[in-house]
Amino acid sequence: MLSIGEFSSICKVSAKTLRYYAEIGLIHPEEIDPENGYRYYSISQLETMLFINRLKSYRFSLDEIKSILHSEELPEEALCLALIKKEQDMKKQLLEYEKTLEQMNQDIENLKQGKSIMSYLDTIEIQLTEVPQMYLLSVRKMVREGEYPQEYAKCYGRLFKVIRENKLTVTAPPMVLFHSEEFSPFGLDTEFAIPVKEYVTGTRDHTPGLCLKTVLHGPYSALPSVYAKQRRWAEMEGYEGNGPLCEVYITDPSQVSSESELTTEIYYPVKKKASLHPNSKEKK
């Protein structure tokens, strides 16, 4: 048997941490002396502690480790599935870090050249264009912030099923229209839509009219910058919003190997602001 001090020294885990692990049911001492409360661990528990440390190095939480240790499934199967999922999560995080580093390096270069860190906004191009009327087959619903990935798949799956069953003709890529400007406790008023040639039950007229148009080549994380640039352009040129913002997905995310290959068109319907009469005063 090993005292808590010896066990702690071998595994490089503090006695305080071992007491906490016992408290949460992760690993208990093999014996506790009833007279003095001294804790003792068996030699076989060294392997358990090394296993816990190994999973911690893979960024497993203590709750996750506890679930693996006490899983009712076959230990090897449960562990393998957990490791595969963790590997996928870490690869995703690694890609996010790589994108962040790339962006940071670009910001550093801009600052070295005496440019503002926000100078990238100057590269976002704005076009004023007239968008013709179209027929939309759509699903409109309130969507909470974390629900969008599932809702994209669910709603477009439903719409394409209707298109196949009714032999409709798709005339443009899928799009999303945002009918509210901010999230409420119930989510954002969102319309998932596909333009079709035929006017049938379930379709509606959509007449965007005059719009600010921006073509984004790259990840969806850059969309807020486009929104900001369009709003700033509209303000400077004397325009105001005149309908729901619209994103058109030119490329299918499932068909590209990198987010840099994505192409999205953003349309912001606008109209000229009403001019104030020379003798009138703007309300403050």
Image: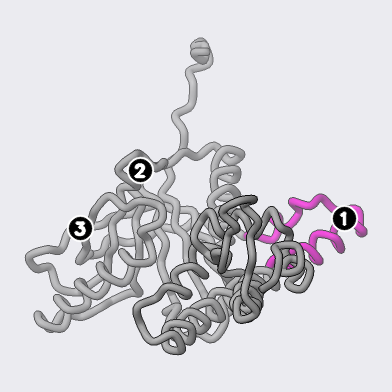
Which three-letter amino acid code belongs to the residue tagged 1? Leu
Distance CA(mark 2)–CA(mark 3): 19 Å
Q: In this orientation, does residue 61 appear? A: no
Distance CA(mark 3)–CA(mark 1): 48 Å
Which three-letter amino acid code belongs to the residue tagged 2? Ser
User: Mark 3 = which residue?
Assistant: 205
Name the residue at 17% across, 59% down: 204
Name the residue at 42% across, 71% down: 249
Q: For the magenta stretch, what is the residue range? A: 100-124
Q: Main secondary structure of the magenta part?
A: helix
Q: Position of residue 146 (x, y in %)?
A: 40, 56
User: Mark 1 = which residue?
Assistant: 111
Q: Position of residue 243 (x, y in %)?
A: 35, 46
Any magenta on residue 122? yes
User: Mark 2 = which residue?
Assistant: 180
Q: Position of residue 17 (x, y in %)?
A: 66, 57
Q: Is residue 122 above or below residue 284?
A: below
Query: Who is closer to the viewer here, 206 or 79?
Result: 79
Q: Point out the frontmost of discs 3 and 1.
A: 1
Q: In this orientation, does residue 123 appear? A: yes
| Helix, strand or loop under label 3 | strand
- Asked if the residues shown at circle 2 and circle 1 are in contact, with their CB atoms under 8 angstroms apart, the answer is no
- Asked if the residues shown at circle 3 and circle 1 are in contact, with their CB atoms under 8 angstroms apart, the answer is no
Which three-letter amino acid code belongs to the residue tagged 3? Asp
